[in-house]
Amino acid sequence: MDYNALIEKRFVGFVKEVGYKTTEIREGYARGEVVLTEKHGNPIGSIHGGVLFTIADNTGGAAATSRGRYVTTVSGEIHYLRSAMDCKKLIGESREIKVGKTLCIYEVMITDENGTELAVATMTYQYLGKLVELD
């Protein structure tokens, strides 16, 4: 699979609007990041939790899709470990837990640019029965 083409194919819509960019994909693994701006903040001066969940969902989804099949999110559970304050960038990195016939599960760790762990998520995806087509 051409992982660079897959990275480009995934940079659309909401993901693009949020500024999330997948930086690496290989079989069962993905890494991505968001360079933070004022639009990612919340009223208390930290980064909005929805931004972190978006990173978790997209990083896990990219890793799941790396196996050549489209997926949809079935469920996601996130644990916010620390507030994301005074950060310049957030990074998501996935770890494959299980790949089954119809479901796959990934853990995603989210850190800031200094490697401080901010959140950990467990994401479950369902394979849609459609192969990824890359131009």
Image (spheres, rainbow, N blue to C red):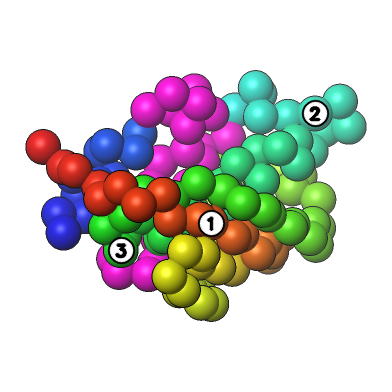
**Label 1 close to label 2 by CB (< 8 Å):** no
> If the image is split into quadrants, where does the C terminus sit?
top left
Closer to the camera in the image, 115 or 57:
57
Q: Amino acid at mark 1?
A: Tyr
Give the magenta part as a residue range. Answer: 12-36
Measuring from the top left, give residue 104's x and y in whole percent.
50, 67
Does residue 62 belong to the magenta stretch?
A: no
- Tell me the quarter of the picture where residue 110 sits: bottom right
**Outermost residue toward the right in this view:** 44
Closer to the camera in the image, 24 or 105:
105
Residue at 86% from the left image edge and 25% from the top image edge: 43
Q: CA distance from mark 3 to mark 1?
A: 12 Å
Q: Earlier in the sequence, mark 2 or mark 3?
A: 2
- Judged from the image, the secondary structure of the residue bearing numbered disc 1 is strand
How would you rate the neighbour count of disc 2 (Cα within 10 Å): few for under 14, some for 14-19, many for 20 or more? few
Residue at 37% from the left image edge and 69% from the top image edge: 28
- Whether residue 47 is visible: no
Q: Which residue is mark 1?
A: 125
Q: Which residue is mark 3?
A: 67
From the viewer's perspective, is 81 left or right of 117? right
